[in-house]
């Protein structure tokens, strides 16, 4: 019995050291060297202070900023509460929330409302909107900031990110990056 127990314990210690300590350290080291920005959360800094991540949406209020998708993650974009709402298309709660969002957007524009401005993403943390959703908000933001709409439209177009690897996903606009670029216009 002891002859079988000793190799089992030794194997447990060796595999724990190898797979529980050495491998994670090696992967973390490679990630820090090769992909430092991504390994550290794709943080966005302004004046040396972290103001957000390009991977997690933020709430922007007021007419002066572009707004992202509604969040189903807790109160705003709470990463600890990341999940969809699990509300189905016949849910009165979902219908009321979407109807309220539509009514609010109709006050500022009569254009067709892009679906991503009234529905939450699967995680509730999506930091991006479609170029159509950004274009929908150009007039409101330009009016609130006293800027020519064409200047704001050009800024949106400069912020459009293409499909990943040229064929995955859809074109998108990161709302935090767009709003930071918008703030930089006034400097």
Image: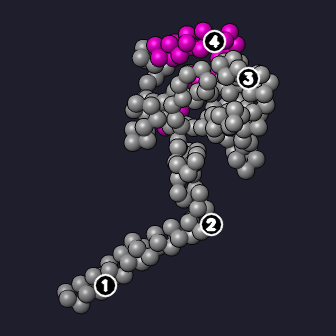
Question: Could you tell me which secondary element the residue under label 4 belongs to?
Answer: loop
Residue that badge 2 annotates = 34
Question: Could you tell me which secondary element the residue under label 3 belongs to?
Answer: loop
Tell me the mark number nearer the camera, choosing from 4 and 2.
Answer: 4
Given residues 145 and 84, the one toward you in this image is 145
> Which quarter of the figure has residue 115?
top right
Question: Could you tell me which secondary element the residue under label 2 belongs to?
Answer: helix
Q: Does residue 173 appear in this view? A: no
Could you classify mark 2 by the number of other residues whose Cα lies within 10 Å: few (under 14), some (14-19), or many (20 or more)?
A: few
Given residues 39 and 163, the one toward you in this image is 39
Does 72 sit left or right of 168 as displayed?
A: left
CA distance separating discs 3 and 4: 17 Å
The N terminus lies in which quarter of the figure? bottom left
Q: Earlier in the sequence, mark 3 or mark 1?
A: 1
Q: How many marks?
A: 4
CA distance separating discs 1 and 2: 34 Å
Residue plotted at (53% across, 25% down): 61
Seen in the picture, residue 1 relative to 89 is either above or below; the reply is: below
Q: Earlier in the sequence, mark 3 or mark 4?
A: 4
Residue plotted at (80% across, 24% down): 150
The C terminus lies in which quarter of the figure? top right
> Disc 3 vs disc 4: Cβ atoms closer than 8 Å?
no
CA distance separating discs 4 and 2: 45 Å
Residue that badge 1 annotates = 10
Residue that badge 4 annotates = 108
Tell me the mark number nearer the camera, choosing from 3 and 4.
Answer: 3
Tell me the mark number nearer the camera, choosing from 1 and 2.
Answer: 2
- Which disc, if any, is residue 147? 3
């Amino acid at each position: 019995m002891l002859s079988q127990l000793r190799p089992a314990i030794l194997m447990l210690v060796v595999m724990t050291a190898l797979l529980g300590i050495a491998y994670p350290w090696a992967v973390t080291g490679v990630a820090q060297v090769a992909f430092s920005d991504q390994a550290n959360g794709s943080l966005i800094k302004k004046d040396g202070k972290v103001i957000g991540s390009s991977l997690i949406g933020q709430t922007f209020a007021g007419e002066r900023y572009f707004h992202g998708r509604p969040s189903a993650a807790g109160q705003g974009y709470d990463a600890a509460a990341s999940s969809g709402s699990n509300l189905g298309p016949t849910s009165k709660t979902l219908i009321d929330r979407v109807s309220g969002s539509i009514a609010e957007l109709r006050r500022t524009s009569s254009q067709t409302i892009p679906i991503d401005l009234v529905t939450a993403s699967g995680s509730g943390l999506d930091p991006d909107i479609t170029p159509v959703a950004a274009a929908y908000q150009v007039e409101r933001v330009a009016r609130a900031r006293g800027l020519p709409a064409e200047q704001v439209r050009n800024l949106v177009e400069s912020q459009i990110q293409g499909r990943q690897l040229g064929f995955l996903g859809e074109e998108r606009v990161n709302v935090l990056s767009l709003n930071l670029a918008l703030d930089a216009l006034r400097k």
